[in-house]
Image: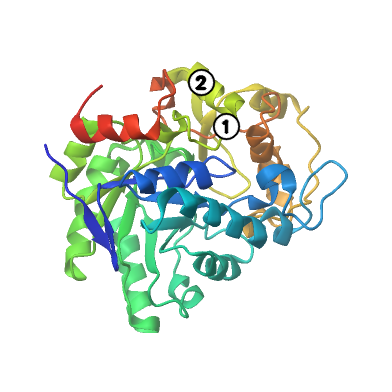
Amino acid sequence: MAFSGFTVGKYTIEKPIIQGGMGVGVSWDQLAGTVSREGGLGVISSVGTGIYENRAYADKLMADGRPYEAENFYSRKALFKIFDNARKICGDAPLACNILYAMNDYDRIVRDACDAGANIIITGAGLPLTMPEAAKDYPDVALVPIVSTAKALRILCRRWEKTHGRLPDAVIVEGPLSGGHQGFKRDECFLPENQLEQILPPVVEEAEKWGNIPVIAAGGVWDHDDITRMMELGADGVQMGTRFIGTHECDASDTFKQVILNSTEETIKLVKSPVGYPARSVQTNLQTMVAEGTAPKIACISNCVWPCHRGEEAKAVGYCIADRLSDAYDGKEETGLFFTGSNGYRLNEIISVHELMDKLMNGEA
C-alpha cells in the first residue's frame, strides 16, 4: 500500500508518520529534527528539559543535580535551545511539541512552546479540555489532543466549540500497547474492546461528525503492515514512539537504548505511576528495589506533575518519576525507569532515522 501525507491545521505532513513525544530526553532536538527533515512529524517532548545538556539551562539545582521546582525541571531556556537545534536540522518543516496535561504550569509550557517555534502542540495524560485557552494567542499553532475513546473526543469537541469556537486540528487515538502512561485503568488495558483496532473506527466515525478531523492511530504500531492496517481502518496517519528509540539520532542515552534492546516480551510490563495512570516500562533493578523497599529516597524536589500531590503519590507507588526518568536519560541503569511500548522487545538493532522511515514507507522488515 502506498502512503500519502495529510494536513494538520495549516501544516502538511509529507509522510503519515508522527514520532511520539518521549520524555525525559528521548525525543529532543536530534530525533525530532531528523524525523521532520525526513518528511514525518518530529515531536519534541517538553518533559524534563531542565536536565538538557547536563542541566546547563536550569537556574537552580540541588547538590545532587536535581532541578529545583517545576520551573527548573521544565526549563523554558532549554526548550528554546532544543527547538533552535531542531530547526537547524529540519529547516521550515513542521515541528511539534508534546506537553503533558498533567504537568504543573501546563498553560505556561504551551505558550513557551509556541514562542519557541512549535507549529503543532500535542497533549495527552488527561483530557485536555482547556487546551485552546492555553494557546489562544497563537491562532496558527495546530492543536492535537490524545484520546482513548470516541466518547472522550465527543466531550472534548463539545467543550472546545462551546468555549472557544474551535475544534482539534487532528486527534490521536492511543491504544493500551503504547509506552509510558496509558489512557485506561490497568485492568482495562487488557480488554479486547479497548485495543487500538477496536477503538479506532468509532473515533474515526466521531471525527467525521465534526468535519472530518484527521485521526492518527497510536499504541503498538510497529511496521509497514501495521500502518497499512490502521489506514484501512480509517486513520490518516500513525504515531510511533518505541520504534524510534532504535535510531542513532534518538536523544536517549546509549544505556537506555541497550535496556530496550535487551528487553524481552516478558520483561515489558505495566507499572504504577505517581501520575495516576498505569505506565509501561522495562522491568529492571528499579522495580526490584521498589518491591523490596530499597528504592532511592523520595523527596519531591522537582514538583513535576500535579496529580502526584507534591510527592504523596510517589511515596504510594515507591518512586519519584522525575528522578527515575532523569536517571534513565543519564544512563544510570540501576535506578532508571525505562519506558517502552509493548513491542520494545522487537528492537534488535540501531539504525538511522532515514533508514527507518524508508522501511516504514516501503514495507521492508
Pick whichever, 55 or 88, lies toward us: 88
Task: Please state which amino acid type lies under the numbered disc 1.
Answer: Phe
At horizontal 23% and vertical 41% (from top left) the residue drawn is: 197
149 to 250, vertically: above or below: below
Q: Is residue 28 visible?
A: no
Image quarter of the N terminus: top left
What number is the disc on residue 281?
A: none
Q: Which amino acid does label 2 sit on?
A: Thr
Residue 38 in the figure: left or right of residue 31: left
The reply to whether the C-beta atoms of the residues labelled 2 and 1 are less than 8 Å apart is no
Residue at the farthest right position: 63
The mark lying in front, picked from 2 and 1, is 1
Residue 227 place in picture, x, y as percent: 23, 38
Q: Residue 267 carries which label?
A: 2
**Gap in Å between the C-alphas at discs 2 and 1?**
11 Å
Residue 313: % across, % down: 68, 48
- Dot 2 lies on which element? helix
Which of the pair 314/114 is nearer the observer?
Answer: 114
Which is more N-terminal, label 1 or label 2? Answer: 2
In this orientation, which residue lies closer to the viewer: 108 or 114? 114
Within 10 Å of disc 1 (Cα), the crowding (few <14, some 14-19, many 20+) is many
Please report the residue visible at 61 percent of the width from the left and 23 percent of the height from the top.
284
Q: Which residue is drawn at 40% across and 25% down?
A: 351
Q: Can residue 204 be seen in this view?
A: yes
Residue 275's place in the image compared with 106, above or below, is: above
Residue at 62% of width from left, 33% of height from top? Answer: 337
Q: Name the residue under label 1.
A: 338
Residue 266 appears left or right of 39: right
Quadrant into which the C terminus falls: top left
Give how far across and how far down residue 267 sits, in percent. Answer: 51, 20
Could you classify mark 2 by the number of other residues whose Cα lies within 10 Å: few (under 14), some (14-19), or many (20 or more)?
Answer: some
Q: Residue 315: horizontal and vertical position, in percent?
A: 73, 43
